[in-house]
Image (cartoon, rainbow, N blue to C red):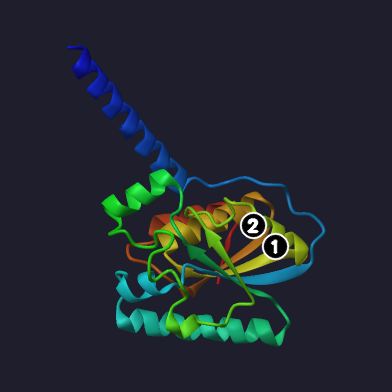
Amino acid sequence: MSVVYVFVGALVAVLLWLVAGVVRIGAVSRGARVEGRDGEALVLIDLQSVFWNEGPYSEADKQAVATVILEEVQAAKAKGIPVIALRQEWSLPATKVIARLTMKGQAIAGSSGTELAAPFAGIADYELVKRVQDGFETGALDALLAELNVGALRIVGLDYNYCVAKTSLGAVRRGYDVTLVERGVLAGQDTAKTRADLQGQGIALA
């Protein structure tokens, strides 16, 4: 009987560990409030090969969104606005397991396809790796934006309901002026609820 108890206890511990990993993936972080910054940055989220080429997006949608994103990049560079690309790499032990179980193992750190997709290769001034949906979670984006004196963000990329939404919420919690360029964002599912939630948090939709 003791062996059964040990087995059940171990199973429960593993399940709790995985649940904690799921919660961490979707959590929105908090950070120091932004004050007195007048700079702007364009943030590209998860425009990497594995998601762009193998995600649930039609070719027509990708072509339309790529056109908008490249226009946004061109406009930003013309104004001297930095372009920051965030790339997803699942590197935490629990998230790597979850990615293998539910995401076909896509974007696990060290795997193929984590580089920016061909239409976006080489266009970013800065590239940062994120570990969960919220691009602010590691603190690296906070530090870079502080260094660049950025107080306003324009956001494009994928996926609307997940990494785009969570990073946008992480930004607005810190006091950034956030504009989500909807024509430059891909979504695999309906976005009505997410859209309403973001607007309710003061995020501008362009």
Residue that protrudes farthest toward the right in the picture = 36
Give the residue number, with chain letter if any, for mark 1.
144
Residue at 47% over, 62% down: 88
Label 2: how many Cα within 10 Å (few below 14, some 14–19, many 20+)? some
Is residue 27 placed above or below 148 in the rendered structure?
above
Amino acid type assigned to the residue bearing label 2 in the image: Ala
Q: Can you say which quadrant of the picture contains the N terminus?
A: top left
Label 1: how many Cα within 10 Å (few below 14, some 14–19, many 20+)? some
Is residue 92 placed above or below 152 in the rendered structure?
above
Give the residue number, with chain letter if any, for mark 2.
140
Residue 131 in the image: state x and y as whole percent. 49, 54
Residue 149 in the image: state x and y as whole percent. 78, 65
Residue that protrudes farthest toward the top in the picture = 1
Q: Left of 18 or right of it: where is 80?
A: right
Quadrant assignment, res 42 = bottom right
Quadrant assignment, res 145 = bottom right
Tell me whether the residue at label 1 lies in contact with that at label 2, contact meaning CB atoms closer than 8 angstroms.
yes
Residue at 69% over, 53% down: 175
Number of residue marks: 2
Is residue 93 placed above or below 165 in the rendered structure?
above
Residue at 59% over, 54% down: 136
Amino acid type assigned to the residue bearing label 1 in the image: Leu
Residue 180 in the image: state x and y as whole percent. 55, 67
Q: Left of 63 or right of it: where is 74?
A: right
Relative depth, front residue between 117 and 178: 117
Relative depth, front residue between 178 and 145: 145
Q: Can you say which quadrant of the picture contains the C terminus?
A: bottom right
Residue 19 in the image: state x and y as whole percent. 36, 37
Residue at 40% over, 55% down: 193
Mark pair 1, 2: CA separation? 6 Å
Q: Secondary structure at mark 2?
A: helix
